[in-house]
Amino acid sequence: MSSIAQLLDGKALAQRMQAELAEQVKALQKQHGRAPGLAVLMVGDNPASAAYVRNKERACQTVGIVSFGTHFPAETTQAELEQTIWNLNHDDRVDGILVQLPLPDHLDSVALLNQIHPDKDADGLHPTNLGRLVRGEPGLRSCTPAGVMRLLAEYKIDVSGRQAVVVGRSILVGKPIAMLLLEADATVTIAHSRSPDLSALTCRADILIAAVGRQNLITAEMVKPGSVVVDVGINRVTDGTGKSRLVGDVDFSAVQPIAAYLTPVPGGVGAMTVTMLLHNTVWSYSQKF
Ligand SMILES: NC(=O)c1ccc[n+]([C@@H]2O[C@H](COP(=O)([O-])OP(=O)(O)OC[C@H]3O[C@@H](n4cnc5c(N)ncnc54)[C@H](OP(=O)(O)O)[C@@H]3O)[C@@H](O)[C@H]2O)c1
């Protein structure tokens, strides 16, 4: 008898978490006289970035976080942005600062991210926070990796002692997810574009995380029966009629009858990322008192 994977519903969990955060924000505001604040810096007019920023600002509004969004023209200089970050670092109303990537080519994004005070690093990408993650110390965790772990916890998926394979090794996703899984006592393998015989690695995975950005990279033959498959990838594809939609890295319909749990795209990990950003902002705020 064949079964079908249970979907890990990031959208539903994100909604529940946002409702809880809204209650928490209300209580914190009553107690301390102000709501948490998040500043999102966007430079230029990349339409995908603009949509992400709108989404983040809307989510802030939903839970009662004040947004200090600033939209800069594409020709803004490094010095102007550094000054803005300095001001936000010293602004007591601001608990989280986020620079929306990618930035225009003339800007040094790593230098800017490093300027953000580690305690206001809502994206968890500052070297201090990545260092805390590696050392297993409390700190701000990157949103997408933290969202994956929260989703697994929600479905009571225990990763301890299990084989986890992370495909992708970026600073944004792959490496921090691998560290979080290691922290949760999984045995972790990290695969990347130079890994020969990817399938031999993924077939061993009790927990498989795909974070690459390539449609259908993970096929049914690459998945261990009864495993947990988390699809972080986001790829925009256009069908024959010219209509576009988002898909992940996993061949969803082929893998669904094989895995025990599977995240949909959209509605899986992506839905969790913004919620973890709100969570981080509230966490930073609450650390001040
Ligand atoms: N759901 C969300 O909220 C969310 C958030 C962030 C990102 N994403 C999505 O997640 C995906 C990954 O994002 P990213 O920022 O990590 O991308 P990235 O910086 O481009 O990294 C992609 C990784 O995939 C590896 N890779 C490329 N081709 C491969 C192959 N054929 N086999 C195995 N590994 C391969 C690369 O290996 P090398 O290091 O060897 O080049 C690299 O480590 C993208 O689709 C992105 O849109 C989703």
Image (cartoon, rainbow, N blue to C red):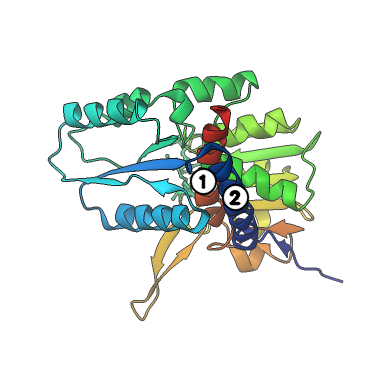
Q: Does residue 212 appear to the left or right of 268 in the view shown? A: left
Residue 109 percent location from the top left of the image: 30, 31
Residue in the foreground of this view, choosing between 44 and 231: 44
Residue 211 percent location from the top left of the image: 53, 45
Tell me which residue sits at (15%, 37%) in the image: 76
What label sits on residue 286 in the rendered view?
A: none
Compared with 141, 255 (above or below) is below
What label sits on residue 278 in the rendered view?
A: 1
Residue 52 percent location from the top left of the image: 38, 54
Earlier along the polypeptide chain: callout 1 or callout 2? 2
Q: Does residue 277 appear to the left or right of 158 in the view shown? A: left
Whether pointer 1 and pointer 2 mark residues with C-beta atoms closer than 8 Å, the reply is yes
Secondary-structure class at tag 2: helix
Asked if residue 275 shows in the view, the reply is yes
What label sits on residue 21 in the rendered view?
A: 2
Q: Amino acid at mark 2?
A: Leu
**Image quarter of residue 237:** bottom left
Tell me which residue sits at (45%, 24%) in the image: 118
Secondary-structure class at tag 1: helix
Disc 1 C-beta below 8 A from ligand 1: no
Compared with 178, 150 (above or below) is below
Compared with 237, 187 (above or below) is above
Residue 254 percent location from the top left of the image: 64, 66
Q: Amino acid at mark 1?
A: Leu
Q: Which quarter of the rendered picture does the C terminus lie within?
A: top right
> For the residues carrying marks 1 and 2, which lies nearer the camera in this image?
2
